[in-house]
Amino acid sequence: MPVLPLSKMHGAGNDFVVVSEEVIGSFSLPDLARRLCRRRFAVGADGLLVVGRGGRHAVQMRMFNPDGSEDMCGNGLRCVAKWASLHGLTADTCFTVETIDGDKQVELLSDGRVRVELGEPRFEPNEVPVLAEEAPVVDMPVDLPHGTVRITALSTGSTHGVVFVDSLPDDERFLRDSPMIENHPLFPQRTSVLWTVVESPSRLRMRIWERGAGETLACGTGACAAAVAAQLHGLAGESVDVYSAGGMLHVEWRPGEPISLTGAAELVYEGCYLLDEVMI
């Protein structure tokens, strides 16, 4: 019976199914993501990473959320860098990966972690995108049925809304308000929601709701967005450790420069999946 070779990887608990572009054939990638990412019914993951040879560089990645939407992903980028090295796409420790958000520089560190550059954050409303008049969009009031939240909106390759709070929301508030913010009319392409506590100028803590995925244990582009937003508010410095349920990611950013994201990228297992099961 035909099978699909795959790898399971994670970055700080943000987990992915990774497949080679060469073995996909004629399958619809959004449909494949919806099928493979179903927890308890399939492999289960926060997203599908498809890796292949790039047109300009040795490696190209595409990432699809569990709902089939395509997006950029910082944790996924680190996993792709590790996967490409393990599977012989490149012998270099520093190389470029082509993504939906442009070319990204990656570096495999000697301690097993991966450092990636995600480019400069975007603040212009049409680039986030968010329906606002001025940039940066800081403390924008968003009305919800149970009150108003203030959101700092920006893009770090994916749309993020950062909500600074004194303590992380409990399940009732998190599960009630996060999807309403994600799908609020102010965000025409939806947004991820980053509930963020500033513990010190060098330490943040988040609870994460990702667009197209729901709650996740970590978010690389989200950690970067929270760190940048904290700087905009004068709450954090240029070097920040961002903690979430899955672990810690290190973010560095200086205005006018690309954001640097460093963290683990782990191979969990490799195996095969029955293609007939994917098509159910």
Image (cartoon, rainbow, N blue to C red):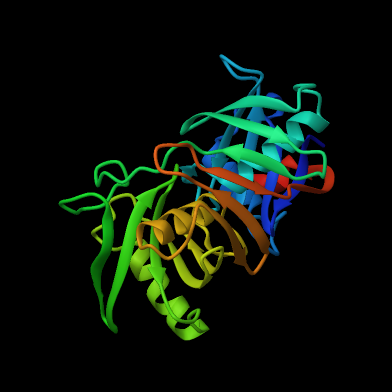
Could you tell me which residue is drawn at 55 percent across and 45 percent down?
A: 73
Q: Residue 242, relative to residue 158: is it above or below?
A: below
Please, which residue is most extreme toward the left here? 133
Residue 203 place in picture, x, y as percent: 57, 66
Query: Which quarter of the figure has residue 176?
Result: bottom left
Q: Residue 63, relative to residue 179: is it above or below?
A: above
Could you tell me which residue is drawn at 20 percent across and 53 percent down?
A: 131
Could you tell me which residue is drawn at 66 percent across and 61 percent down?
A: 248
Query: Which quarter of the figure has residue 242?
Result: bottom right
Q: How many marks?
A: 0
Could you tell me which residue is drawn at 52 percent across and 42 percent down?
A: 30
Residue 28 place in picture, x, y as percent: 55, 35
Residue in front for this viewpoint, 246 or 15: 246
Residue 108 place in picture, x, y as percent: 74, 35
Please, which residue is most extreme toward the top here? 56
Residue in front for this viewpoint, 143 or 4: 143
Q: Residue 166, relative to residue 58: is it above or below?
A: below
Q: Residue 166, relative to residue 253: is it above or below?
A: below
- Left or right, 249 with respect to 130, comes to right
- Left or right, 175 with respect to 263, comes to left
- Left or right, 57 with respect to 19, comes to left
Residue 196 place in picture, x, y as percent: 47, 69
Residue 275: in sight, yes or no?
Answer: yes
Query: Which quarter of the figure has residue 24?
Result: top right
Quadrant location, the N terminus? top right
Residue 192: in sight, yes or no?
Answer: no
